């Protein structure tokens, strides 16, 4: 008899659970679905946040030139055209006077204003051959001034950049001396090996990052390491030498 009642109780209990479960199933499934969706959404948000903080902004040269031309409507517009099937940016800047400091070869105020407008939105900016450039939270200065007048954030030889630098910039501005005579007379240093420095820049740059190299000639570079994607002819004033802002981009 006892066994009979025990069995009946057990069957009733199991039947109760089955009924409850049947009612709960849709609720459980909906809850699990919502939880999975929330986790996925949080993951994407986190990824976007990381991208925003660490990665090179993905803006094409066309878009950069367009934004620049809108901000400087009074000067000759920058042009982006197809060159062997790839976009190439070119232009002509007549800058006028006004330098950041009195150091020989110091950047022109207008050059910095224009070039930082064209290449805005970068998170890790390196000024190579920084010379007399003042400190700023917006960039890191790398250089060597044997005349002892100016300090950089990182003292080092540009030819050894990759073994000294402890981060990967997404934008490098480089302003090397142009000739052996100038390097020795004005900076008490030997002329650096341009192609070696360009190669070092390509090594440390983030994929998609830019190297903006100011010089009187186009440095030798390897197409496998970095691409030549633009050139802006640059002059301070009449009787000054022409310079070129050579624009390189590390492939993605
Ligand atoms: C043309 S000046 C740059 C001036 C800078 N744009 C400014 O606004 O003052 C070149 C600077 O690079 C430094 N320099 C030359 N060769 C170098 C090398 N191999 N490594 C690091 N710095 C170097 C020179 O001493 C000088 O200070």
Image (cartoon, helix red, strand yellow):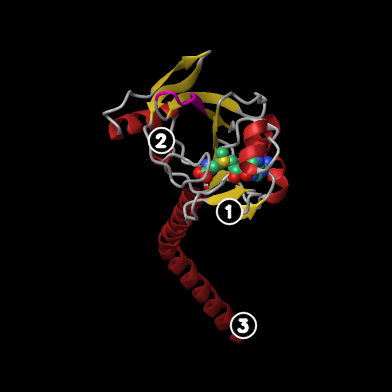
> Residue 249: x, y in percent?
56, 31
Task: Find residue 236 and report its image quarter.
Answer: top left
Q: Indicate left or right for 140 with 180 as reference.
A: left
Q: Main secondary structure of the magenta part?
A: loop
Question: From the Cβ of disc 2, is ligand 1 less than 8 Å away?
Answer: no
Kindly identify which residue carries mark 3. Answer: 3
> Residue 27: x, y in percent?
40, 62
Provide the secondary structure element on which disc 1 rests: loop
Q: Is residue 171 visible?
A: no
Q: Nearer the viewer, mark 2 or mark 1?
A: 1
Q: Quick check: 215 above or below 44? A: above
Say whether disc 1 or disc 3 marks the residue closer to the N-terminus: 3
Task: Determine the quadrant in which ligand 1 lies.
Answer: top right
Q: Kindly report the distance in space between the C-alpha atoms of the residues bearing marks 2 and 1.
A: 30 Å
Q: Indicate left or right for 243 with 194 as reference.
A: left
Q: Nearer the viewer, mark 2 or mark 3?
A: 2
Kindly identify which residue carries mark 2. Answer: 118
Number of numbered tags placed on the structure image: 3
What are the residue bounds of the magenta stretch?
A: 238-245
> Residue 165: x, y in percent?
66, 50
Q: Is residue 15 magenta?
A: no
Q: Is residue 84 visible?
A: yes
Q: Indicate left or right for 186 with 121 as reference.
A: right
Provide the secondary structure element on which disc 2 rests: helix
Mark 3, Cα crowd under 10 Å, few <14 / some 14-19 / many 20+, is few
Asked if marks 2 and 1 touch (Cβ < 8 Å), the reply is no
Kindly identify which residue carries mark 1. Answer: 149
Task: Find residue 2 and report its image quarter.
Answer: bottom right
Q: Nearer the viewer, mark 1 or mark 3?
A: 1
Provide the secondary structure element on which disc 3 rests: helix
Q: Quick check: 9 above or below 45? A: below
Say whether disc 2 or disc 1 marks the residue closer to the N-terminus: 2
């Amino acid at each position: 008899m006892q066994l009979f009642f025990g069995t009946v109780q057990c069957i009733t209990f199991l039947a109760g659970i089955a009924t409850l479960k049947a009612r709960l199933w849709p609720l459980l499934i909906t809850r699990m679905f919502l939880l999975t969706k929330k986790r996925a959404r949080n993951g994407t948000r986190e990824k976007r946040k990381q991208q925003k903080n660490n990665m090179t902004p993905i803006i094409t040269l066309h878009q950069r030139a367009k934004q620049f031309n809108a901000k400087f409507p009074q000067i000759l517009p920058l042009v982006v055209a197809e060159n062997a099937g790839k976009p190439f940016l070119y232009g002509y800047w007549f800058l006028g006077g006004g330098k950041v400091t009195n150091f020989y070869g110091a950047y022109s105020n207008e050059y910095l204003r224009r070039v930082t407008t064209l290449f805005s939105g970068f998170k890790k900016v390196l000024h190579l051959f920084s010379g007399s450039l003042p400190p700023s939270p917006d960039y890191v200065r790398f250089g060597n001034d044997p005349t002892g007048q100016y300090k950089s954030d990182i003292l080092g030889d540009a030819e050894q950049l990759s073994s000294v630098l402890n981060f990967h910039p997404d934008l490098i501005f480089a302003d090397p001396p142009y000739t052996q005579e100038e390097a020795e007379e004005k900076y008490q240093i030997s002329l650096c090996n341009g192609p070696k420095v360009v190669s070092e820049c390509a090594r440390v740059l983030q994929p998609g990052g830019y190297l903006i190299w100011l010089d009187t000639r186009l440095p030798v570079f390897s197409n496998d390491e970095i691409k030549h994607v633009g050139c802006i002819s640059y002059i301070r004033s009449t009787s000054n030498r022409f310079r070129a802002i050579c624009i390189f981009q590390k492939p993605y």
